[in-house]
Amino acid sequence: MISRQMAGRDLHMTIFIPTPLRPYTAGQEAIDIMASTISGALDHLTEAHPELRRHLFTDEGKLRAFVNLYLNDEDVRYLPAREATPVAAGDTLSIIPSIAGGCSSVSVR
Amino acid sequence: MAAITEPVPLPELTSDDLSRYSRHLILPEVGMEGQRKLKAARVLCVGTGGLGSPLAFYLAAAGVGTLGLVDFDVVDASNLQRQIIHSTRDIGRKKLDSAAEKLIALNPALNVVKHETMLSSANALEILKDYDVVADGTDNFPTRYLVNDACVLLGKPNVYGSIFRFEGQASVFATEKGPCYRCLYPEPPPPGLVPSCAEGGVLGILPGLVGVIQATEVIKLILGKGEPLIGRLLLVDALSMRFRELKLRKNPECPVCGDNPTVTQLIDYDQFCGIAHETPQSAAVKNGIPQLTVKEFKRRRDAGEDLFLLDVREPYEYQIAQIGGTLIPQNDVPQRLAEIPRDREVVVQCRSGGRSQKIAELLKQAGYMKVVNLAGGILAWSDEIDPTVRKY
């Protein structure tokens, strides 16, 4: 079990980008980031790919409710420190948006 | 894990059943008792399209006794790339009729119940109440929330699957101790933010993969065997063929399935998902972008107005059909703004008006003062102005 590093030290981690958001990361599905916390990782991600910002965050800077974040396999909403949770080297952050395709040629947009 | 069939005597198996299901009967996890549970089971498939096709086929093959089908759509040629329950000669036919015919050909003992309707808050509880398990194969957010809420209110497990391009999700929602769809996604995305399959495209095999995963979960719930995807979100990436799993928790504050539910009856799901029922005035502007009809665009172009038609589709689409626009695929637009004039009115165009709307909004945010969206895209142009422009 990898112990969590002290906050403040940037560590190597990977962010998985879901298909609907890949147009905003030049098609990349996994992005390596150095960060010490989850919110730090998201800041670095949106600095490198500013188009992502409005898809992930509201105007007030809050994470959008239909976007789920997972640190490894745990939902960030249920972590005690939520986005302030420190990350360990090799951690993954998954962005899981709602998708609704079922699919037919008729859909509501 | 308890099976979900009712505590009434299970139906007997006929001699036809014994020969048909022999491969099930010799499996310890199924056996005679399991097959009888399948025969007693009533499963509702919401949607007989991409996910519904493999789902319904395998449930019929497995010996599920009663299969309800909900669909009001008609078979279209573009469905046949993935909706394998339908055939070429079914084009133009009701999906329900096409699906029922193939299912009964596979398994004549199957009891098919057709629900030719759009599921709504007015009918969902009435339709769902007679089934043991619901399998959600729909393609839009309002119906997903509707099915979820109805399942929670009625106490029916909701076997969920959804797809986009080459990625899929699957889980089992609305069981007593497990989460529901709203625990995962408390709010829907605003309309237009998540492209539909018609816009984003979808790998034909993908609903096959995910639909059979759903069928597997339905069968496991009926048999009471194995570990169902309760509290687990299965993620499928078909391109890399990687399967990942995330933990789903039941949200104690969930408005539908939590400790203090506030949603105790079905609501207006279109409104919940921000889909306004459009009036003619509101259709003229979307998210601050004026909508230009193809007729009006033709009139102004023919009158010699200096409009810049920006086509944001992909090169292969441009090769199929184009109406004289300058092609800059949508993902390239942010890097190629220098090629898009700021001093002329920019008319953004795509296939059906969805991608072009997003790019129009992007241009507006980038400071373009005169941007409009060609409503309906090249499809509308083909329908209303020039039928020789090929549709695809």
Image (cartoon, grey):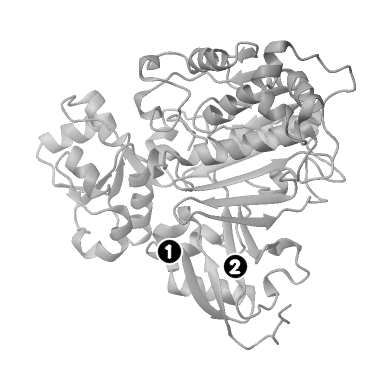
Q: Is residue B294 visible?
A: yes
How would you rate the neighbour count of disc 2 (Cα within 10 Å): few for under 14, some for 14-19, many for 20 or more? many
Q: Is residue B281 rendered to the left or right of residue B138?
A: left
- The relative height of residue B42 versus residue B140 in the rendered view (above or below) is above
Q: Quadrant of the C terminus of chain B?
A: top left
In the image, which disc is placed on residue B382?
Answer: none
Helix, strand or loop for disc 1: helix
Helix, strand or loop for disc 2: strand
Q: Is residue B273 visible?
A: no
Q: Residue at x 89, y 18 (%)?
A: B8
- Residue A57, how many percent across, how many down? 56, 62
**Which mark is in front, 1 or 2?**
2
Q: Is residue B246 rendered to the left or right of residue B254?
A: left
Distance from the alpha carbon under mark 1 to that under mark 2: 18 Å
- Residue B74, how many percent across, how many down? 44, 18
Identify the amino acid type marked 1: Glu
Q: Which residue is mark 1?
A: A51
Considering depth in this image, is B240 or B17 the residue closer to the camera? B17
- The relative height of residue B92 versus residue B356 in the rendered view (above or below) is above
Q: Which residue is mark 2?
A: A93
Mark 2 falls within which chain? A
Q: Is residue A78 rendered to the left or right of residue B383?
A: right
